[in-house]
Image (cartoon, rainbow, N blue to C red):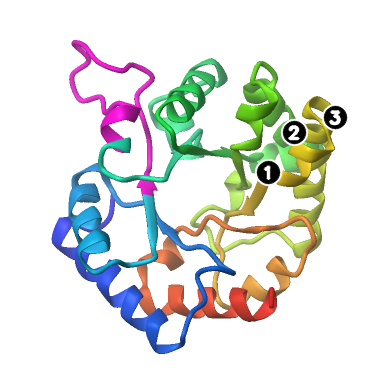
Amino acid sequence: MNFDHLEATYFVQQLAWNLRAIHFDYKRCEIALMPSFTSLRSVQVAVESDNLKIRYGAQAVSVTSQGAFTGDVSADMIAHLGCSYVIVGHSERRKYHPEDDANIVDQVRAVLAAGMQPILCVGESYEERRKGIELDFAVGQVHDVTRDLSDEEAAKLIVAYEPVWAIGTGMVATPQSAQDAARAIRNDLSDTFGTRVGETVRILYGGSVSSKNAVELINEPDVDGFLIGGSALKVDELTRICKLTLETTA
């Protein structure tokens, strides 16, 4: 929970200004922000009124479309605010609400049905890494959520590998660890849905991403981008990460 609607609007405008100043090429590197529900309309107005090329999405979604579910926000409601993406299965949602794989499958389907793309978060805890089962765990999470999807649905998925022990801790997976996880996830998707889908799905890395480690992470062949947490709350730091990513993938 960060930024009220006024702060979110200012952040979007400042980020757009920063990126314009460095002649950022949005055709080669996509940027999407995930504000809170209460800020989505304000962000929509800022983006549309200034014709900004920044995309945006929601941090969570309800599995229900309508009815007496106080506090829930449906996928259709989110889509009507111009969102392109919805994060599903984030470790904090799994931990604090809690959400299980069955619920996350329903979220993925709801997001797809509303014409948006789900960003599926997976990743192991420190204990699972200590046991040496981190790859099996992350791949298992992806497989459990995607196994009943059609090829067409799976191709629209974005997967974010976020080792839980690295989120907000300052610890970060090594580039090789991030690559190993991304490759294992891509291989599983290819085995399930075919090579075309496996190579189409974008795989992101998340977990203490900063301008200090972005280059070495994005250089890995199966890491297609980032799901950024704390660093994305600082507009100048986020600008640096965007600039470095664009330069590295040129």
> What amino acid type should be assigned to the residue bearing mark 1?
Val
Q: Secondary structure at mark 2?
A: helix
Give the Cα separation between the discs numbered 2 and 3. Answer: 12 Å
Decide which of 66, 93 is in the foreground and name it: 66
**Residue neighbourhood size for the residue with mark 2, other residues' Cα within 10 Å, grouped as few (<14), some (14–19), many (≥20):** many
Q: Position of residue 141 (x, y in %)?
A: 66, 29
Question: Residue shown at 44%/30% (left/top)?
Answer: 111
Circle 1 is placed at which residue position? 201
Circle 2 is placed at which residue position? 139
- Part of the protein shown in magenta: 57-78
Q: Position of residue 35 (x, y in %)?
A: 31, 52
Circle 3 is placed at which residue position? 191
Decide which of 179, 45 is in the foreground and name it: 45
146 left or right of 96? right
Check residue 228 in the rendering and tell me which mark sits there, or answer none.
none
Question: Residue shown at 18%/19% (left/top)?
Answer: 70
Give the Cα separation between the discs numbered 1 and 3. Answer: 13 Å
**Residue neighbourhood size for the residue with mark 1, other residues' Cα within 10 Å, grouped as few (<14), some (14–19), many (≥20):** some
Q: Which tag, 2 or 3, sits closer to the chain's start?
A: 2
> What amino acid type should be assigned to the residue bearing mark 3?
Asp
Q: Position of residue 211 (x, y in %)?
A: 56, 77
Q: Which tag, 2 or 1, sits closer to the chain's start?
A: 2
Name the dominant secondary structure of the magenta segment.
Answer: loop
Decide which of 129, 197 is in the foreground and name it: 197
Question: Residue shown at 39%/57% (left/top)?
Answer: 55
Observer able to see residue 215:
yes
Q: Identify whether 216 is placed above or below 198.
A: below
Q: Secondary structure at mark 3?
A: helix
